[in-house]
Structures are given as C-alpha cells and as structure tokens.
Image: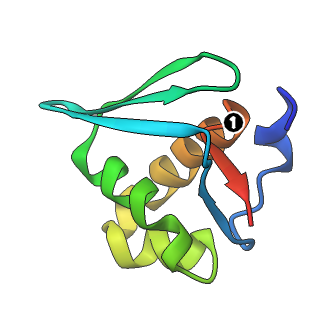
Amino acid sequence: MSADSASTFDAAQPWTLSPQVALRPEQFGALAYHYGNRRLTFLKSPTLVSLVEHLGDFDNVEVAVDASVQPHERAAYVAALARLAASEVLVAR
C-alpha cells in the first residue's frame, strides 16, 4: 500500500488490522507497531482501538463505524481509519 492510500481508502469496502501490526494497550488508547515498515502509530482513543481491533468482523468500514460510534463522530473516525490505512496499519480484505 502506498502513501496515497488515504485517497484510495473506501469505507464501503472491508478492511482489517494488518497481520504485520501489533497493538499495545495504553491508558490513552494503544500503540500500533508495524513490523514491516517499523512505524509506530498512536491510537489516541479507546474507541478507535476497539474499532481497529474488530474492523475485520464487519462487512465493511461503514457498518463497523456505525456500530461503534455516535453519528456526529462518524466522519472523524472514518478519517482516522483512512489515515491508518495510509500508514499500512489497516489493509484491505
């Protein structure tokens, strides 16, 4: 996945946590470490951590977000997931 993945991120498609990423719980949320590109990403919300951990259980991102967050928070979480896809934390299924 390239650096422009955020522009190709489609919330209507299924995504999941990359198998190359480990999440370490923290008080603020979690640290995501990618063993392939060696990037460390901060997930600054327990809700975002839960969403990322369970994203693969849903048919697509839209369904996962709708089940996990309030409607007024939807756009912010979809944008956060797009950034995680651009960082290769998330991969398309």
- Provide the secondary structure element on which disc 1 rests: loop
In the picture, the quarter occupied by the C terminus is bottom right
Residue at left 34%, top 70%? 68
Amino acid type, label 1: Glu
Quick check: 14 above or below 27?
below
Residue at left 46%, top 51%? 77
For this view, does 47 lie left or right of residue 59? Answer: left
Nearer to me, 34 or 51: 34
Residue at left 86%, top 32%? 4
- From the image, tell me which residue sits under label 1: 88
Residue at left 50%, top 66%? 55
Q: Position of residue 92 (x, y in %)?
A: 75, 59
Q: In the current view of this chain or complex, which residue is farthest to the left?
A: 27
Q: Position of residue 12 (x, y in %)?
A: 72, 73
Quick check: 33 above or below 90?
above
Nearer to me, 42 or 73: 42
Quick check: 56 above or below 86?
below
Q: Which quadrant would residue 11 be assigned to in this image? A: bottom right
Q: Count the marks: how many?
A: 1
